[in-house]
Amino acid sequence: MSVNASVIIPAWNGSRFIDDCLRSLRQHTPLAELIVVDNGSRDGTADLARARADRVIVNDSNRGFSAAINQGVAAAQGEILLLLNQDTVALTDWQAQASALFDADASIGVLGFVLLYPDGTVQHAGARLTMPFLDAEHLTKHDPAAALDFVTGAAMAIRRAAWEDIGGFDEGFSPAYYEDVDYCFRARRAGWQLQMSARPAFTHFESQSRGEAVEQVARVNVPRLRFALKHFGAHWLEDVLMRGEMLRLLNASDRDWLRGIQMAYERAMAQAPEACAAGAALAGLEPRQAGGQDPVAQAVENLLQLRKMSLARRLTMERVWEAA
C-alpha cells in the first residue's frame, strides 16, 4: 500500500514533548507514516518514540536540524512530507488540509500551517523577511493574498515532486536557523509556489531554554550571514550594512544585540578559509585569484571593522549623524 504522507520529526532531548506529539498525530492522521530522527538524545527520547513511531533513526551526536530532516526524508515513503518540530501537538487532520491544497494547485510545492501558542493565540501564519537585516516577520493572521517569503520549518509540508526537484535541506545551516528560509527561497526560485493552510493545525510550545541573550543572538546570526551571502551575495554587506543610516541603527541597538552580532561574525571568521570559500561558491562569486582576497572573507572583515567603529562611536552619536 502506498503511503500518502510521511511526518519527519527531528528530536533532541525531547522526552517531555515527543510522546504528546506522536500521540496527537496518531489521533488525527492515523495512516501517516511517522519517522523520528533522534540527534543523540541523552534523556530517553528515542525509547519513547519507538512506542508510537513507525521508524526511529538514532544518531550518535546532534547532527543538526537540516541533516536530520534529510535523513528522515531519505527513509520516507510518502508523497507529502511533513517536517515537524518535536514540541508540537496536532490539533486537526493536517493531512486532509495538505492533500486538498496540493491537489487543487499543482504549482504549490511548500505548504505552511497556522501555528498557535499554548494560550491559543496565533504564533505563525506565514512570514516575510524585513530589510536590511533579514529579520523574520511572522504574520499573526492568515491572509491568502499575503506575499510570503517563507513558512516556518516547525511545521512545513513539501510535495514529494518539489523535494526531488529542489533537493534536500542545506546542512551548512547547522545546528539550526534560516534553513527553512533558505529552502523556501530555493523553492520559489525553482518555480514552486508557497501557500498557507488557513485553519490552525498545530500548537507549538517552542523551546524555553535558549541560553543567554548574547549566545542566542550569535547562534541566529551565523546562519543569517550564510543565508545573506548565498542569496544576496557579498554585496549585501557592502551595499546594505556599510551605510551611514545602518551605523546609526547599530549604535542605537541594545547591548546584547551588538555583542551577539560581534560574536557571530567573529565565529564566522574563525571558520575561514573553508567557510568563506564555501560561502563564495554558494553566492556565485568568482573564485579567489592567486594571491587575492577571498571576497566573502573581505566582506566579513569589513563588517567586523564596522562593528568596531560602531562601538567606538557610541558616545559620539552626533558625529555619526553628521557623517550620514
Image (cartoon, helix red, strand yellow):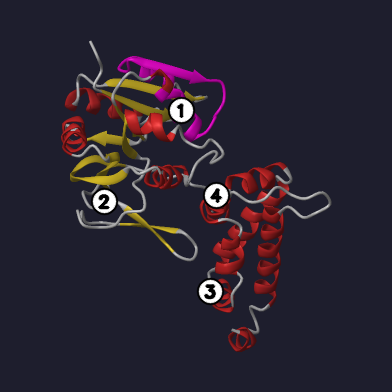
- Which residue type carries mark 2? Ala
Q: Nearer the viewer, mark 2 or mark 1?
A: 1
The residue under the point 69% across, 73% down is 309
- Which residue type carries mark 3? Leu
Q: Which residues are magenta?
A: 46-73
Quarter assignment of residue 128: bottom left
- Where is residue 89 drawn, in percent x and y? 26, 34
The residue under the point 38% across, 28% down is 9
CB within 8 Å, label 2 to label 1: no
The residues bearing labels 2 and 3 have C-alpha atoms spaced at a distance of 28 Å
Instruction: Say which label, 4 or 1, has the lower sequence index.
Output: 1
Q: Which residue is mark 3?
A: 249
- Residue 249 as seen in the image, left or right of residue 199: right
Q: Nearer the viewer, residue 97 or 19?
A: 97
Q: Which residue is mark 4?
A: 230
Instruction: Say which label, 2 or 1, has the lower sequence index.
Output: 1
Instruction: Say which label, 1 or 3, has the lower sequence index.
Output: 1
Q: Nearer the viewer, mark 3 or mark 4?
A: 4
Q: Nearer the viewer, residue 221 or 19?
A: 221
- Which residue type carries mark 4? Lys
The residues bearing labels 1 and 3 have C-alpha atoms spaced at a distance of 38 Å
Instruction: Say which label, 3 or 4, has the lower sequence index.
Output: 4
- Which residue type carries mark 1? Asn
Q: Is residue 144 above or below residue 303?
A: above
The residues bearing labels 4 and 1 have C-alpha atoms spaced at a distance of 20 Å
For the C terminus, the quadrant is: bottom right
Q: Which residue is mark 2?
A: 125
Secondary structure of the residue carrying tag 3 is helix
